[in-house]
């Protein structure tokens, strides 16, 4: 089957990215996306089959490039150290600073993409989260490995906690900076668009917090089966007391 004539696949993705960022996935419609792309529903359906598939393609499109920026910075730190493992601060810098730069770049597409990405990471829809988890879990394991290399004596439990907290701080900033809440909270003395000021403070905050988490004592935690048994025991006691 030949592709219908009309707007290109890339243009449909550009428009979908913009509308998903503006309205959110649920409020966006494929009819509006096709119309604003100067195309037809038939063309959109040919390329993407469904709105969910369209969202998946929007999420995948910039993902590799986004993480290539982080890998490039990490390699620069490795080279700077003559092939040795970067420090913890350098490692965290490579994880967060490239995304901050993209979010604050002059190309609106990156801001839109990261807005959608953050929503999908912290949204409540299980099906939509499944789309994003296929992307973020492998990359999370890769970048957690960077943290492990920088802090080889810490536990895997602490590494996992630290990575989740680092990413949470990063995307909280990305999601808020367009609305410049920082400006309102500071009484106009600061702005979220001040990249040097914000990035230095965020980096200092995240590095200090990460160090504290990596040094946190790890105690043996109950297994999921034990947790279920504890819950069941509590329920039985509650029934008897009632």
Image (cartoon, rainbow, N blue to C red):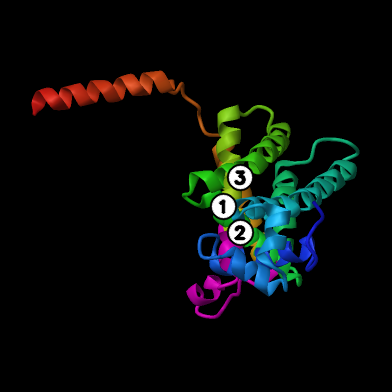
In magenta segment, residue 182:
yes
- First along the sequence among labels 2 and 3: 2
Cα distance between the residues tagged 2 and 3? 12 Å
Callouts 2 and 1 close, C-beta under 8 Å: yes
Q: Which mark is residue 120?
A: 1
Between 29 and 238, which is closer to the camera in this rendering? 29
Circle 3 residue: 131
At numbered mark 3, what does the secondary structure look like: helix, strand or loop?
A: helix
- Tag in front: 3 or 1: 3
Segment tinted magenta in the rendering:
172-197
Residue drawn where x is 55% and y is 60% of the image: 25
The relative height of residue 119 versus residue 220 in the rendered view (above or below) is below
In magenta segment, residue 78:
no
**How dense is the environment of label 3, judged by Cα within 10 Å: few (below 14), some, or many (20 and up)?**
some
Cα distance between the residues tagged 2 and 1? 6 Å
- Tag in front: 2 or 3: 3
**Residue 197: x %, y % from top left:** 67, 68
**How dense is the environment of label 1, judged by Cα within 10 Å: few (below 14), some, or many (20 and up)?**
many
**Residue 224: x %, y % from top left:** 42, 23
Cα distance between the residues tagged 3 and 1? 8 Å
Residue 192 appearing in the image? yes
Residue drawn where x is 27% and y is 22% of the image: 232
Callouts 3 and 1 close, C-beta under 8 Å: yes
At numbered mark 2, what does the secondary structure look like: helix, strand or loop?
A: helix
**Residue 107: x %, y % from top left:** 76, 70
At numbered mark 1, what does the secondary structure look like: helix, strand or loop?
A: helix
Q: Which mark is residue 116?
A: 2
**Residue 32: x %, y % from top left:** 61, 70
Residue drawn where x is 56% and y is 78% of the image: 189
- Is residue 34 rendered to the left or right of residue 157? right
Name the quadrant containing residue 147. Answer: top right
């Amino acid at each position: 089957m030949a592709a219908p004539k009309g707007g290109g696949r890339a243009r449909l993705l550009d428009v979908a990215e913009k509308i998903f960022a503006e309205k959110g996935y649920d409020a966006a419609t494929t009819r509006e996306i096709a119309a604003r792309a100067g195309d037809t529903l038939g063309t959109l359906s040919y390329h993407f089959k469904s709105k969910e598939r369209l969202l998946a393609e929007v999420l995948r499109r910039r993902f590799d490039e986004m993480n290539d920026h982080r890998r490039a910075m990490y390699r620069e730190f490795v080279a700077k150290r003559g092939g040795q493992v970067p420090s913890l601060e350098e490692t965290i810098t490579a994880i967060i600073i490239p995304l901050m730069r993209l979010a604050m770049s002059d190309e609106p597409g990156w801001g839109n993409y990261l807005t959608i990405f953050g929503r999908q990471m912290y949204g409540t829809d299980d099906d939509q989260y499944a789309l994003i988890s296929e992307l973020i879990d492998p990359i999370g394991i890769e970048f957690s490995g960077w943290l492990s290399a920088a802090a080889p004596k810490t536990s895997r439990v602490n590494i996992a906690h630290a990575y989740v907290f680092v990413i949470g701080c990063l995307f909280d900033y990305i999601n808020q900076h367009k609305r410049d809440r920082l400006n309102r909270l500071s009484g106009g003395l600061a702005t979220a668009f001040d990249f040097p000021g914000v990035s230095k403070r965020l980096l200092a905050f995240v590095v200090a917090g990460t160090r504290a988490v990596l040094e946190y004592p790890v105690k043996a935690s109950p297994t999921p089966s034990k947790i279920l048994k504890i819950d069941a025991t509590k329920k039985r006691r509650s029934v008897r007391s009632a």
